[in-house]
Image (tube, helix red, strand yellow):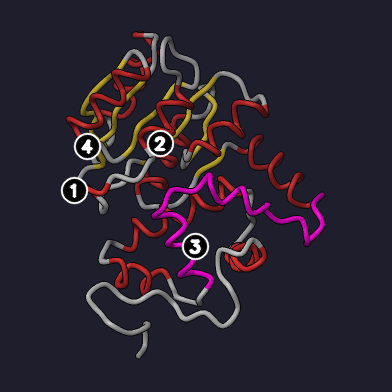
Amino acid sequence: MAIHVLLADDQPLVRAGLKMLLDAESDIEVVGEAGDGQSAVDQVDQLHPDVVLMDVRMPGIDGVQATKILTADRPDDVNHLVNVIILTTYHVDEAVYAALRAGASGFLLKDAAPNDLVAAIRTVASGDAWLAPPVARRLLSDFAARPDHHLPAPGMMQKLTPREREVLVLVAHGLSNTEIANHLIVGEATIKTHLGRVFMKLGLRDRAQAVTAAYQTGLVKPGEHPPTRFGNKGPIGR
């Protein structure tokens, strides 16, 4: 099955170049184009693409705000999340962090090699994250400079959607991605996407730090049982 992609950029020539590049790939299909953030949001609702390539700077609703709208919980389509890759000619920190906090699954510079663009699309479509090397190096430097106890403040949890908090709670209780997927009755790739967004939004390095953050912020309390499985009356495993 082909990966369906929506192109969102206010420059027609950029969209044309991206479309030509992606149409050459047998497993990728460009299903729509948008010249601004609002059009991107509207077309996602109509076309349900797997990945949106989103320019960060567009008229009206910009790429960051459009990403925030598209990555909000959608109860009517819980098993088909929109994965957004932010595209920009700049790699300024403000744009990077704003995009990640908004829920983007990837960040790529427009001067990246074509193979990197294709790899990024395939990666985020599978539920994983993709960061351009300059961005990844900066984030790793920031993480390395943090003391281990420097974790998100309790208020940071409000940046997560209800479903993202639900996934984090289950991670904190020791469930694997497969177990969480079975618990929430969604695909495992969907769980990977949710968890990747949690890491991005909260600035977490790995699963272990996510568990620590869940307990230290009070999202999960010691001794609590995991939430009940859908349709069950008792805690998981009972």
From the image, tell me which residue sits under label 1.
1
Number of numbered labels in the structure image: 4
Rendering coords of residue 43 (x, y %): 23, 25
Q: Residue at x 55, y 69 (%)?
A: 220
State the quadrant of the C terminus: bottom left
Q: Secondary structure at mark 1?
A: loop
From the image, tell me which residue sits under label 2.
84
Q: Secondary structure at mark 4?
A: loop
Rendering coords of residue 4 (x, y %): 24, 37
Q: Which residue is nearer to you in this view: 211 or 140?
A: 211
Marks 1 and 2, how far apart in space?
A: 19 Å
Q: Secondary structure at mark 2?
A: strand
From the image, tell me which residue sits under label 4.
48
Q: Residue at x 56, y 18 (%)?
A: 89
Marks 3 and 1, how far apart in space?
A: 30 Å
> Residue 105 lies in magenta, yes or no?
no
Q: Residue at x 33, y 13 (%)?
A: 35
User: Which amino acid does the dot numbered 4 rest on?
Assistant: His
Q: Magenta stretch mostly in which secondary structure?
A: helix
